Image (cartoon, rainbow, N blue to C red):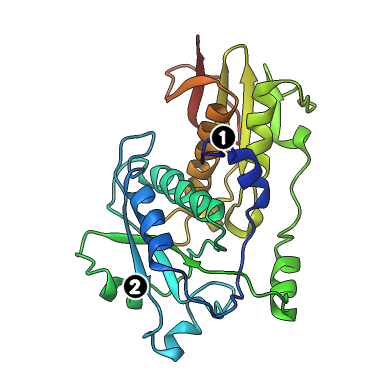
Amino acid sequence: MHTFESSILETIKARRSVRSYNNSLVASDVLDQLLSFASDHVTGPFGNTIRFQIVDARGFDPSSMKSLGTYGAIKGAKSYLVGISRPAEHVDEDFGFCMETAVLKATSLGLGSCWLGGYLNRSTFAELCHIVPEEIIAAVTPLGYASPRTTLRDKMIRKAVDGDKRRPFNTLFFAESFTKQLSYDEANPRHVLLEAVRQAPSASNKQPWRILLTDNALHLYLDEDFPYNNRFEHVHMQNIDMGIAMAHITWAAQTKGLLGKWEMLSTVIAHEKFTYISTWTSQAV
């Protein structure tokens, strides 16, 4: 029997953004299973805690639905998973880590999803989730079953952000120094972790992660588009992307039987453009 951990690499490959749903309701026991799992995984690598709620969208004002996301309305979804955080250092990374873990669980349950953040219209969700003043809805995702037909609008959106494309492995990952690009070796378990990052979703598909591989560690850096990442007061989408990368490494490592932990090192190789985020360090089995 496949567990969430054992099948994570297949789940990562299977996940894709779904914007049009087939109008079917998701069974309450499936939603309960997802929420229970998400609620058991609410603390990120930096120690911040995230809160999750699932809301029923059937009573939403149709006019508010038209402005839910950056790329226009999500069609047909009856349920949404809402991620809620509070301002803190590295909370964006922790939010990305926990939310992506929940998204991958949703995928393993056969549900479609789509990260919605940035210009997301948060007012409807804030009311339903009883948000207190210091809380932030950094992102939400619809939950449901993909429409059997891909709409022209969906195709145009994916084309606009090159949603099906990923940067070449050797442009994202480096060995020992940033002057040595890394070529993918499927037989190398740590390369498998890197490939799991390469396949991850990111805001506008910018894929801002850069990783330096050393003897026993993966050093994660952000190649920041500063104006893009600082458009919003309380949410930094590319730092959320860093948390998504950390989640893919963490879960892929478990699948490959690799033990490791995330830590911020006091001395790492500096880069004139990339910002150091954290290091996944291998531990002896």
What residue sits 70% from the left and 74% below the top? 148
Q: In this view, does 249 lie above or below 29?
A: above
Q: Which residue lies furthest to the front in this view?
A: 1
Q: In this view, does 225 lie above or below 253?
A: below
Looking at the picture, how far across and down is residue 209, in whole percent?
Answer: 61, 40
Determine whether the residue tagged by mark 2 lies in a helix, strand or loop: helix
Looking at the picture, how far across and down is residue 146, in whole percent?
Answer: 62, 70
Quarter of the image where one finds residue 136: bottom left
Determine whether the residue tagged by mark 1 lies in a helix, strand or loop: loop
Q: In this view, does 163 lie to the left or right of 197?
A: right
Count up the numbered dots.
2
Residue 45 in view, yes or no: yes
Q: Residue furthest left?
A: 132
What residue sits 47% from the left and 46% below the top? 101
Quarter of the image where one finds residue 74: bottom right
Given the image, on which type of amino acid does mark 1 rest?
Ser
The answer to which of marks 1 and 2 sits earlier in the sequence is 1
What residue sits 23% from the left and 66% below the top? 131
Name the residue carrying label 1. Answer: 6
Name the residue carrying label 2. Answer: 125
Q: Is residue 150 above or below residue 59?
A: above
Given the image, on which type of amino acid does mark 2 rest?
Phe
Mark 1 → mark 2, Cα distance in angstroms: 33 Å
Mark 1 crowd level (few <14, some 14–19, many ≥20, 10 Å Cα): some
